[in-house]
Image: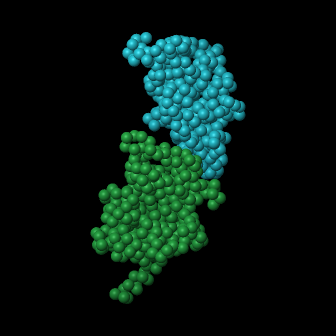
Chain colours: A green, B cyan
Amino acid sequence: MYKFAGLFLILTVGHAADLTVGTAVAKSGQRATGFIQVSAGADAAASIPVIVINGASAGPKLALVAGSHGTEYASIVALSKLAQSVDPAQLKGALVIVPLVNVASFLQKVPHLNPIDNKNMNRLYPGKPDGTQTERTSWEIGKQVVEKCDYLIDLHGGDLDENLRRYTYWADTGNPKLDAPSKGMVLAFGFDHIVIQRPRANAPRPPGATSAISRFAQDRGKPSITAEAGHAGTSSTEDVDALMRGCTNVMRFLKMLPGTVVPVEKPLWIARYSTVVSEQEGIFYPLAVPEEYVQKGAKIGYVTNYFGQTIWDVTSPISGVVLYICAVPSMKKGDSIGYIGELADAAGAQ
Amino acid sequence: MSLSLQVPSGLSVLLILGVAAHAADVTVGTAVAHSGQKVNGFIKVPAGVDAGTDMPVIVINGAKTGPVLSLISGSHGTEYGSIVALPKLAQTIDPAALSGTVVILPLVNVASFLQKVPHRNPIDNRGLNNYPGKADGSQSERAVAAIYEQVIQKSDYVIDYHGGDLDENILPFAYWTKTNKEPIDTITRDMLLAFGLDMIVAKSGGGSLDSTVISLGKPGITVLGGRSGTAGTEDVQALVRGTTNVMRHLKMLPGTVPVEHPLWLAHYSVLKGDQEGIFYPVAVPRAYVTKGMTVGYITNFFGEKVSEITAPVSGVLIYINSVPSVKKGDNLGYVGELAEPPIK
């Protein structure tokens, strides 16, 4: 057996080795599907679908992750379509595609949270092997996806109750080994609104602090970006295509696929954003649209009570662009109404 | 006077007093409205070098005295939002509650509307907003001259209504024609604030209706709602609500006007098509664009990209072309630069 294996290795010189993620085992030049099994623990088990596309020739490993919010549909649809469209024979390196991390959220149509334990599936990395389902899932994704990859794109969008157009996040970590490739990735992705994250601003973090998957990957030296498209329960062709095209362009940028990339030349850089939080319960009416420029103090919506009387005018705390705005009438105290992004030009940050 | 018999005696007295001080009959075209009446008619433009045209007019002569406000729409006959809004508004105004007179021209460019030709009057291929017009010119010029004589000259205030035409994508906004003279700039500014559209673009002069009105010393503003062949409820309501609020502001109707905080823009730049072909927008109206940012592109009919349309200045996209058709020299959008609000 040993001798045989040695012979096999000699025959496959120049090819990537087998790649195993969960139950999916893809030999070089193959596409394999399977599940990342999260065993039952404090609560129920979960099986998270994964597609591994192991390219015919060697190259980097790119992880594409969606559906940690299981009703951000455009990103989920985009990754499942992309999984079918990439030809392993053309691919250098490997793709690990996780189209739907939060299966219970998707099936039960519960936005933002995993309904099994009511936790946010993209805030608790590195997770815990002995925690609740969200924590165990994060732990498994961390071990089996993030640790095995060189680069990562986390895909999101406007959730069931959020109206947004398209933007990406780029982390300015201060580490040029991360920031140069991730900037190349985000420009190659091609969305023309880019929000700059500054993780240094809240460093050092307390021990045991948890994070989103992108920051978890960055902390492990893996360049990663986040992309947002789709809104309010829809998965329009335009949004799905934009996400698929973005991922394909990043693969080209990383030399995983043939073809040239035209990076976005003049994106709108957003230096930071302010969250608008509701002070009232009632019926919300938006008065602004995603990407709209609003001035500080501008009315971007209002809340009425259930008798139809206006009880609160929602105004913008800063001048900037609307990154997203609440898409539904339901509003309670403390809910996020939207993000207003401050122009990097104006902030002198870019 | 049968109305006064149906109301409590105290109000009858008021009505009688109102009648005593009532406005005179108002005549516009074939519409003759006594005080307290709403009357429909036509402004007749007789045939001349080309065909004649009849422009619909609604005259609402309030039971009480007050200013004459004229509302003019449809000089671009496929800017449907306002063409739908003004007849709806006309139905909602009660002449008994009105102080002063409202003269409504919901559709000035009838041929453009009927033939679905954007931007111009298909009868003479001219725009229908070059004031003061010519009594012996082609149809557009004669129509404009008739409006100038029969409506503008008799008005105290004028609102000109537009929108995104068949090929233009906008969100509702208003133009403020600034003269740098007082008190007229303050009066028009306050009318715009009362109208309540949340983006206002300052401009200077030109041959537009509002600047013509202002040159006669009368306040005039321009408002836009609706886009790309649609008359969406939200856009129509914004125009109806805004107009009602201006009437309240001018004390023609009872009620208060909420204070709004619009976005003020100035010095807009025009995006031009530099190639013939198929246009693809990549930015939306109201988006902030930085200088050099791509707002759209043009391909040839083989699908190859031939031109990138970029923002010449940093600012807010006021409108963007919404259809694939583009030829050299076509307008593809406006980018307005941010301006300081002209009010504390």
Q: Is residue B149 visible?
A: yes
Q: Is residue A251 left or right of residue A344?
A: left
- Residue A18 horizontal/vertical position (percent): 40, 76
Q: Quadrant of the N terminus of chain A?
A: bottom left
Identify the residue shown where x is 57% and y is 12%.
B46
Q: Nearer the viewer, residue A85 or B150?
A: B150
Q: Is residue A4 left or right of residue B39?
A: left
Q: Nearer the viewer, residue A321 or B15?
A: B15
B94, above or below A137, in the image: above
- Residue A183 horizontal/vertical position (percent): 57, 64
Q: Is residue B273 visible?
A: no
**Residue found at the very far front of the displayed protein:** B10
- Residue B84 horizontal/vertical position (percent): 47, 28
B142, above or below A334, in the image: above
The image quarter containing residue A38 is: bottom left
The image quarter containing residue B318 is: top right
B214, above or below A37, in the image: above
Q: Is residue B53 left or right of residue A120?
A: right
- Residue A17 horizontal/vertical position (percent): 42, 77
Identify the residue shown where x is 43% and y is 11%.
B1
Identify the residue shown where x is 44% and y is 42%.
A310
Q: Nearer the viewer, residue B263 or A241?
A: B263
